[in-house]
Amino acid sequence: MTTVLSALSVGVLLRESVRRLEAASFPSARRDAEWLLATVLGVERFHLYLEPAQEVAGSVAARVRALIERRAAHEPLQHLLGFEDFRGLRLRVTPDVLIPRPETEGLVEWALESLAPLPRPVAADVGTGSGAIACALAAACPALEVLAIDVSLAALAVATANARALGLARRVRIVAGDLLAPLAALAGGLDMIVANPPYLPSASLPALPPEVARFEPRLALDGGPDGLRVIRRIVAEAPAVLRPGGALVMEIGEEQAGGVASLLAAEGFSGIAARRDLRGVERYIAGRLGD
Ligand SMILES: C[S@@+](CC[C@H](N)C(=O)[O-])C[C@H]1O[C@@H](n2cnc3c(N)ncnc32)[C@H](O)[C@@H]1O
């Protein structure tokens, strides 16, 4: 007796994957299924539609189905792919780091504006995580040296891999430590501190989407009772390491701009301003040390 195994095509596997994620109520079902299938096949997403009749080996289909099930259980797409794109850079991401967010690209833009007039700037990215901000700044500003600091050694392993893979390791220096403590030796020598600190109030964490609450590091999210625990410390410690006129540029949470502006003013910062993200939320704040 012969057993006829019906071959599975790219188009059929894509349809099946989209349906599975739609059944689990994923608004991004098609996009997620495309990314997972294309990545396993090693092709661009559009390629899936060029040759939908192409046959898929059973072992490949099994890998795709396993990934679709993990996505259906809310594992972030970026963890399954192993990367996220940030300002044109492909960054490795793991559960040890915050997945870089598109709004953080706005923070990088503002930091770059401040760095532009300086011939050989030195900056610190405090709470670097995957190294997204440090790498994006160094890639866009060839004269920049940036110290990429994090207290999580597991995160720093990812940042190190990213800086190396992008050919930026000479100018992105990975430093382990608690906020600005590793910068003490630079007293007064830093042109800029840029930070996307944990800024969510602790009580808001359980209500986050499961992708975030269950799979991203709490250390990257939890800003204490009012969300400002880490921000307060950065603002208080910054004047000791910035040069006069040096800038502190931070990403902040919704409705934190007024409170953070007061903290900055109390520590001797001037020219304090907030900017909005693409959703119109006051998301970034900056000030310069001194008058
Ligand atoms: C919101 S994540 C930002 C990650 C990355 N900069 C980005 O924008 O994608 C905050 C980061 O701050 C780090 N962090 C939290 N507390 C810290 C501390 N006391 N000292 C240094 N880093 C800290 C976390 O490990 C995490 O990587």
Image (spheres, helix red, strand yellow):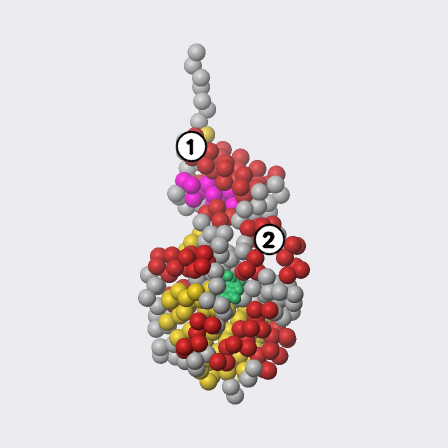
The one nearer the camera, 92 or 136, is: 92
* Left or right for 143, reference 252: left
- The answer to whether any part of residue 44 appears in the image is yes
Q: Three-letter amino acid code at disc 1?
A: Ser
Q: Which x, y percent locates residue 30?
A: 54, 44
Q: Mark 1 points at which residue?
A: 59
In the depicted structure, whether residue 81 falls above or below residue 291: above
- Is 223 or 99 nearer to us in this picture? 223
Residue at horizontal 55%, vertical 84%? 268
Question: Which comes before the other along the chain, label 2 or label 1?
Answer: 1
* 17 relative to 160 in the view: left or right: right
* Magenta stretch: dominant secondary structure: helix
Query: As drawn, is 34 to the left or to the right of 282?
Result: left
Q: What element carries label 1?
A: helix
User: How many marks on residues?
Assistant: 2
Q: Which residue is drawn at 44% across and 71% down?
A: 182
Task: Tell me where residue 170 appears, x and y as whole percent.
Answer: 32, 66
The magenta stretch spans which residues?
A: 30-41
Specify whether residue 37 is painted magenta.
yes
Magenta stretch encompasses residue 249: no
With 208 as the anchor, is 113 left or right in this view? Answer: left
Q: Which of 12 and 236 is in front in this view?
A: 236
Decide: few, some or many residues near mark 1? Use Cα within 10 Å; few <14, some 14-19, many ≥20. Answer: few
Name the kind of residue labelled 2 in the image.
Ala
* Residue 281 image-quadrant placement: bottom right
Residue extending furthest toward the bottom? 291
Q: Can residue 276 be seen in this view?
A: no
Name the residue tied to disc 2: 213
Q: Distance between the residues labelled 2 and 1?
A: 32 Å
Secondary structure at badge 2 equals helix
Q: Residue at x 47, y 64 (%)?
A: 150
